[in-house]
Amino acid sequence: MLSLSRSMLGLTLALILVGLVACQGGDSELKIGQINAYSGSLSFFGESHGNSAKLAADQVMAAGGPTIVLTHEDTQVNPDVGVEAARKLVEVDNVAAIVGALSSGVSMAVSSAVTSPNQVLQISAASTSPGLTALNDNDFLFRTTVSDAAQGVVLARLAKELGYTTAASLYLNNPYGEGLAGQFKTTFEAGGGTVTAQVSHENEQPSFTSELTKATGQDPDVLIAIGYPGQAQVYLREALEGGYIDNFLFVDGTKSADLFDAVGWGPFEGMYGTAPGSAGNDARNTFNADYENAFSEAAENPYTAETYDAVVLIALAAEKAGSTTDSIKIRDALRDVSSAPGTVVGPGVDGIKQAIKLIGDGKDINYEGAAGSHEFDENGDVASTIEIWQIKGGAISSTGRFELP
């Protein structure tokens, strides 16, 4: 009996030890959800953002960081679908943080209905609406891109610089379109210009001729195309074929090579646009090279670097917090790893490895990312520059100008 009891005791202790190891292994996983656009009007960008998140996760693990379990869900660029996708990530997949969405309207809906009430960190890499700043999110919604309160100012200055005295905007009827069109109008008219019309359109429309008629009725010098590639490829073609207008200014949502492949580059040669962006530096060059090596294509779509940075920042914040499961602690550490003071660290396996070592040694770090600095303010916003880009030689090219509002 004594011998049997000892055997049973040994077996029990062994089972307990195995259970503890298994629990520790589970706890070491950092579960991150990504709400992305694999269908709908922003699907032009979806694959590249999925790639960016994967690159970041792979590099964090290669650098000795936590095991990242990355789960992707499609929002279809629809707030209702996005909310259900986020709810699945939080309630079923038990993610510690969410990256996304691309659309401001989806990000705001997800924050209000899912992440903020459940105290789950959310970082959008592409939602630029000024509405995010004022959203009551209990400090759980951040973004790694600058607000359109900045882009609208630079866009209006560019229009004036190009000699346009009148302008109309055709904008998507959501927080992104409304915010950018509104800021453009305020700044353009404050500088002496006249906005002859602001016409909204819906996300899914077979034709935009009615909206084009309203927008161009007073013969503006230029039409500001504010929306996503899915709609723009339709109304740009209709505008040219119908003779409505042939001068355009573009923005981040219409900065898409696939869009101009679809409608033809020639009619838009020499035209300009704006988008959040910063001048090339070692950090951005590292990301660009790593992305191209991993996926055999250039990281040319908007906000790919911002998505990469969002995943890396979540991982570094988890290291700083000492937890891969407690979203509140990860949120609380986010500003610590992304702001001065601290040793400046950058993207790439070597940069992330250095950051993890410094955190392990109890040292402060300041992650300067592929998309630039991420000094989050009290609203979870960052300050950065706006790039002026141009269609040149059948391609989207940077003018080398990066301006503050």
Image: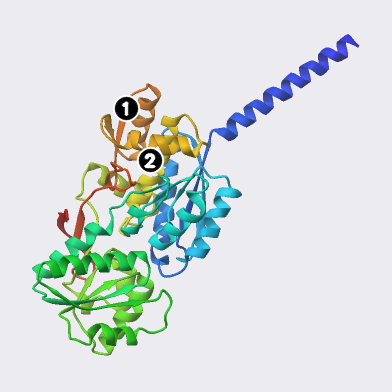
Location of the N terminus by quadrant is: top right
Residue position marked by numbered label 2 in the rendering: 313
Q: CA distance from mark 1 to mark 2?
A: 14 Å
Q: Quadrant of residue 277?
A: bottom left
Residue position marked by numbered label 1 in the rendering: 364
Helix, strand or loop for disc 2: helix
Q: Residue at x 39, y 30 (%)?
A: 356
Q: Is residue 183 left or right of residue 164?
A: right
Q: Is residue 283 left or right of residue 57?
A: left
Say which of 203 and 134 sits in front.
134
Amino acid type at image mark 1 = Asp
Amino acid type at image mark 2 = Leu
Say which of 398 and 136 sits in front.
136
The circle on residue 186 is none
Q: Is residue 162 left or right of residue 64?
A: left
Q: Residue at x 16, y 72 (%)?
A: 270
- Looking at the image, tell me whether mark 1 or mark 2 is earlier in sequence order: 2
Helix, strand or loop for disc 1: loop
Q: Is residue 240 left or right of residue 191?
A: right
